[in-house]
Image (cartoon, rainbow, N blue to C red):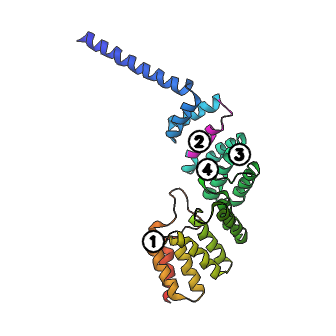
Amino acid sequence: MKIFLKILKILFSSIFLIFILGVLYFVLLSSKEKRFSLAEHSQGTLLSQRMFENLKAQYPDYSNAYFEQSVAFNKYGNHAKGFELLNQAVDLDPELHLGYRGYMKLRFLRQFDGALMDFERLDTLTPNVVDAPWGENIDFLKGECYFGKKEYTKAIESFNLTVANEKEDWADVQTFVYLGLCEYELGNYQKAVSEFKRALSQSEHICEANFGLAKCYEKLGEIALAKDHLEKAQKDIAYKRENEYNEYLNEIYLWEILEFKQTLKK
C-alpha cells in the first residue's frame, strides 16, 4: 500500500510539473500571437496582465499589447493607468490607435478638445478613408464633440457629413436625434421637428426623438402634440440609448419625462 501511494504521489507530482512547465513554455516562449490572444480573452485577470508585461518586455514595439492592456484599466475606471498604456500604443502606431483614444476621451473623459485633436490627426493620416473609430463614423464622433462643446453649428456640419457619407438609411439614427437637438438649442424649432421626424422614420421607438419633439412642440405652443410625443417617449424609454460603462451626451431618463409632464400640466 505504501509503495502504491508513493507511486501515486510521484505520478501526480510529475503531472503537476509537466503542467507547470507547459504553462511556463506557453507564457514565455510560444508565439506572441497566441499569447496575445490568451491575454486578450482573459482581459483584466492577473494572468492577462502578466502576459502583456512579458510581451512588452520581449516586443517593446508591439503596440497592440499596450492597447489591449489599457482596455481593462479604462473599463474599470483606472484611467490614469489606462491612458498611460494607450498613449504608448498611439506613439508606436498612431494610425491604428488614435481613433480609439479619441473615442475614449470623448465618451469616458469628456475631453472634447483632446478627442477632436485625435480625430483630426487621424484624418490627416488617412486622407482617402472615412475612419470608424471603435466602429462609429468619425464625423458622428466629431459631431458629438462639438455638441458637448455647445458649438451647435459645427456639430450640425459634422452630423450632416455623416449622413452624406453613410446615406440616409444607413446613418446611425442618433445622428438625426443630435441634429434635432442642435437645431433646438439654436432656437430653430421647426427645423428640429423635421430632424426628429427623420429619426422616427427609421424607427417609431426612438424615445430620444419623441422627447425632443415634445420639447419642440411645447416651444411652438402645440401642447396637445407635446403631450402625445411625451407619452410615446415614456412608453419607449426601455429602448433608450445607454451603455453600462458611460453616459451618452444625449441620454434621457424617465425622471426627465415625468418632470416635463408635470410642467405641461401647469
Residue sitting at 60 percent across and 87 percent down? 220
Q: Give the range drawn in magenta.
A: 59-71
Q: Residues within 10 Å of mark 3 (few under 14, many from 20)?
A: some
Alpha-carbon distance for marks 2 and 4? 14 Å
Report the mark closest to the observer, 2 or 1. Answer: 1
Q: Position of residue 259 (x, y in %)?
A: 50, 79
- Specify which label sits upstream in the sequence, 4 or 1: 4
The residue at which mark 2 appears reads as 68
Residue sitting at 46 percent across and 70 percent down? 237
Q: Position of residue 145 (x, y in %)?
A: 67, 62
Say which quadrant the N terminus sits in.
top left
- Specify which label sits upstream in the sequence, 2 or 1: 2
Contact (CB < 8 A) between labels 2 and 4? no
- Specify which label sits upstream in the sequence, 3 or 4: 4
Label annotation for residue 236 = 1
Amino acid type, callout 2: Glu
Amino acid type, callout 3: Glu
The residue at which mark 4 appears reads as 79
Label 1 residue SS = loop
Task: Give 59 or 172, whichever is nearer the viewer.
Answer: 172
Whether residue 110 appears in magenta in the rendering, the answer is no
Alpha-carbon distance for marks 3 and 1? 40 Å
Task: Give 59 or 84, whichever is nearer the viewer.
Answer: 59
Label 4 residue SS = helix
> Does residue 179 appear anywhere in the picture?
yes
Q: How crowded is mark 1: few (under 14 residues within 10 Å), some or many (20 or more)?
A: some
- Specify which label sits upstream in the sequence, 2 or 4: 2
Number of dots carrying numbers: 4
